[in-house]
Amino acid sequence: MELQRQISRRLHDEHVAIIDLLGRFGRALERLGAGPPAADDAGWRVLLAQLGTALEHEITHHFDLEETQLFPRLHAHGDGELAELLFEDHEVIRGVTRPLLALVARARLGTLDAAGWRSLKALGLELVDRLGSHAEKEQGALVPLVDELLDEATDQELWTHYTS
Ligand SMILES: [Fe+2]
Ligand SMILES: [Fe+2]
């Protein structure tokens, strides 16, 4: 699919990136098993850092763009049901991501105990599932629609706002 608008291309790229990161996170969680990883596990530490940055961006800038600029346009276009569905996903995903980010921060400091590790693993696997399927859903339904709905001037305006 050839996307015409900068905003839809950017959404597409961010979805691809988060799906890839969640895939790596999910595989690492499965591989690491019952106990927290060793403090010198370099691959895990890099993954935690990437995850912290990416999830923070996802539930603030990325979700805000969709909720404040794109979902209202879906409503106006008669696609309010899709917008509502995606918004409900966001609420659930924020609810999982916030406590997970706190655990990721503790893991990066090396202060995560066994109970904290179990929570991180459970919330992490839940997020992989929920955010992974949400991003896939948006790739299939939201991105093509946004590409169709935005005219060039609006695209430019949203792009300037999003990237500044
Ligand atoms: Fe979304
Ligand atoms: Fe999205």
Image (tube, grey):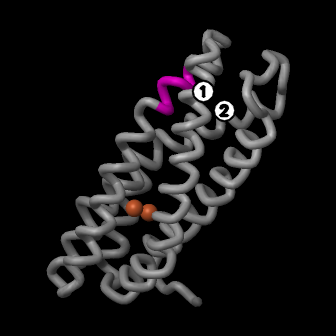
Classify 75 as above or below 38: below
Side of 68 relative to 139 (left or right):
left
Span shown in magenta = 100-105
Q: Which mark is residue 118?
A: 1
Classify 17 as above or below 41: below
The image quadrant where one finds the N terminus is bottom right
Side of 50 relative to 77 (left or right):
right
Classify 162 as above or below 77: above
Tell me which secondary structure the magenta stretch mostly adopts. Answer: helix
Residue 138's x, y, as percent?
Answer: 45, 72
Q: Which mark is residue 38?
A: none
Q: Nearer the viewer, residue 164 or 52?
A: 52
Q: Nearer the viewer, residue 33 or 48?
A: 33
Q: What residue did someone put label 2 on? A: 48
Residue at x 74%, y 43% (from the top left corner): 30
User: Helix, strand or loop at disc 2?
Assistant: helix
Residue 133 is inside the magenta segment: no
Residue at x 56%, y 37% (from the top left corner): 122
